[in-house]
Image: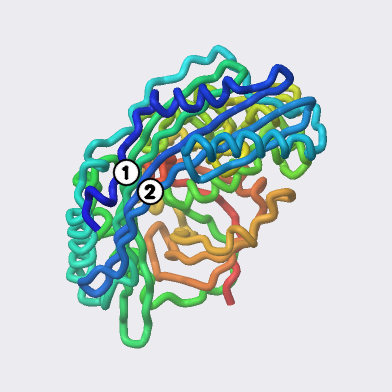
């Protein structure tokens, strides 16, 4: 397939907004209407053994339409921007509203006066790159990974992917927003072998310019993650200080952020319900959700309902400061939206963190290691979906990592279970690292030291 045949014409955001507004303007006097339109395209290249395993180039368009009338909400979506299809989708949303149960909190977002920050998420480097060059990048990454260490037998999967999207939202409450974005990523999973033992590593990076991805770091991280676990044993059970590097800290606090979403709170499904203003974490921990941090790939100007993104300090010096809300959970809780709606064209809005940021401490990762006498550097969590109870906060998940003895890294361990509660883990944070890192997924994270955690092995 040629590049010309694979690439759809990129619509101008204002052009897409005009279509959304025209559809919105067909609202009846007794109803609220919200129209979300999107168009995009993406490429995924997977290579193996020096050849292309798969190449996918796909474009997509779609619409999601919400109708609210007399407290009843109807929603419909389609995979086309064709005028006739959009007409049918509007009619279907109206029809669906007639069958919905009334809910006094249903309604669209209303402009709240917060001014959006201008965020440029577009990349001509992504949109203009040839498919041949994308294949070259993936093949070169695999070649470098397999040639960098004799213990690396192969790379299970190495890939390069990119995509762009143009979106527009228009509603009868006066919201009109249009934007566009593009990004790319590279990932690899090398397989390291030592005798009969094998270990799999992984690493990835993401950005807005393929040529500026940190290819050296992807290679070195992937190989280190694969080789450092060779010879891992199952340790004895004990209580240890655990050390989470920035990626693992972001993983843990991502779980916490779900518990701080207003939709979970109003349904009584969060262990933090009713605890605003209370000390819920170590005084050393300050955590926010701030999509206005333009240093991050996840920075954005508007949320999924078209309200301006804004900083939301969630935990400040260990004190629970606020929950995240979309317009529905904000009304239901008696507060307001925090600009934290997330959604696509195939769904109605929900609540979610968009860009978590930890306020950093002072010491480096190596200095944190040297301060721990009996610990575990957790390099991987597994089973988070099944091992964490989001209502009670119970936490019991698989892990692997490197033991820390006398302030130095010791041997690798696997088949470990880390058990506690989310509430206890937050309160037992004894240090926040100074190693703030903007992760490929967008979060700004630092290392965390957590004392006296049950680490179960043999």
The answer to whether 31 appears left or right of 399 in the picture is: right
Circle 2 — which element?
A: strand
Residue under pointer 1: 8
Quadrant (top left, top right, bottom left, bottom right) of the C terminus? bottom right
| Residue count near mark 2 (Cα–Cα under 10 Å), binned few <14, some 14–19, many ≥20 | some
| Mark positioned earlier in the residue sequence (2 or 1) | 1
Q: Are marks 2 and 1 in contact (CB under 8 Å)?
A: yes
| Residue count near mark 1 (Cα–Cα under 10 Å), binned few <14, some 14–19, many ≥20 | some
Residue under pointer 2: 59
| Closer to the camera in the image, 149 or 344 | 344
In this rendering, does residue 9 appear at all? yes
The answer to whether 128 appears left or right of 429 in the picture is: left
The residue at 75%/44% (across/down) is 269
The residue at 56%/51% (across/down) is 451
x and y percent of residue 71 in the render?
78, 28
In this rendering, does residue 320 appear at all? no
């Amino acid at each position: 397939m040629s590049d010309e045949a694979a690439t759809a014409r990129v619509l101008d955001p204002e052009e897409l907004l005009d279509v959304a507004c025209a559809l919105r303007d067909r609202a009846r006097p007794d109803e609220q209407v919200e129209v979300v339109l999107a168009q995009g395209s993406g490429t995924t290249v997977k290579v193996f053994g020096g050849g292309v395993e798969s190449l996918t180039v796909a474009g997509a368009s779609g619409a999601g339409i919400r109708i609210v009338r007399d407290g009843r909400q109807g929603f419909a979506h389609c995979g086309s921007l064709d005028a006739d299809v959009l007409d049918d989708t509007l009619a279907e949303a109206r029809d669906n509203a007639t069958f919905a149960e009334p809910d006094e909190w249903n309604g669209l977002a209303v402009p709240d006066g917060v001014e959006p920050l201008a965020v440029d998420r577009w990349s001509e480097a992504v949109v203009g790159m040839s498919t041949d060059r994308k294949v070259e990048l993936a093949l070169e990454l695999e070649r470098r990974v397999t040639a960098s260490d004799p213990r690396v037998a192969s790379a299970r999967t190495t890939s390069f992917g990119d995509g762009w999207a143009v979106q527009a939202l228009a509603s009868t409450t006066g919201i009109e927003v249009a934007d566009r974005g593009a990004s790319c990523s590279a990932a690899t999973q090398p397989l390291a072998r030592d005798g009969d033992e094998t270990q799999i590593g992984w690493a990835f990076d993401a950005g807005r310019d393929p040529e500026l991805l940190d290819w050296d770091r992807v290679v070195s991280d992937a190989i280190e993650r694969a080789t450092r676990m060779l010879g891992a044993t199952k340790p004895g059970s004990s209580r240890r200080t655990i050390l989470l590097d920035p990626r693992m800290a972001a993983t843990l606090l991502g779980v916490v952020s779900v518990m701080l979403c207003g939709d979970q709170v109003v349904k009584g499904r969060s262990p933090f319900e009713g605890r605003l203003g209370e000390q819920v974490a170590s005084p050393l921990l300050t955590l926010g959700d701030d999509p206005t941090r333009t240093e991050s790939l996840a920075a954005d100007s508007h949320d999924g309902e078209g309200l301006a993104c804004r900083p939301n300090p969630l935990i400040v010096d260990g004190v629970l400061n606020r929950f995240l809300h979309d317009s529905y959970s904000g009304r239901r809780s008696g507060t307001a939206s925090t600009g934290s709606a997330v959604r696509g064209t195939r769904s109605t809005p929900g609540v979610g963190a968009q860009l978590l940021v930890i306020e950093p401490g002072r010491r480096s990762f190596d200095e944190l290691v040297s301060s721990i006498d009996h610990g575990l550097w957790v390099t991987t969590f597994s089973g988070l979906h099944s091992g964490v109870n989001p209502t009670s906060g119970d936490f019991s998940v698989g892990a692997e990592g490197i033991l820390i003895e006398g302030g130095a890294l010791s041997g690798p361990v696997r088949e470990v279970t880390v058990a506690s509660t989310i509430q206890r883990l937050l309160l037992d944070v004894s240090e926040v690292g100074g190693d703030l890192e903007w992760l490929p997924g967008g979060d700004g994270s630092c290392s965390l030291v957590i004392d006296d955690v049950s680490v179960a092995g043999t």
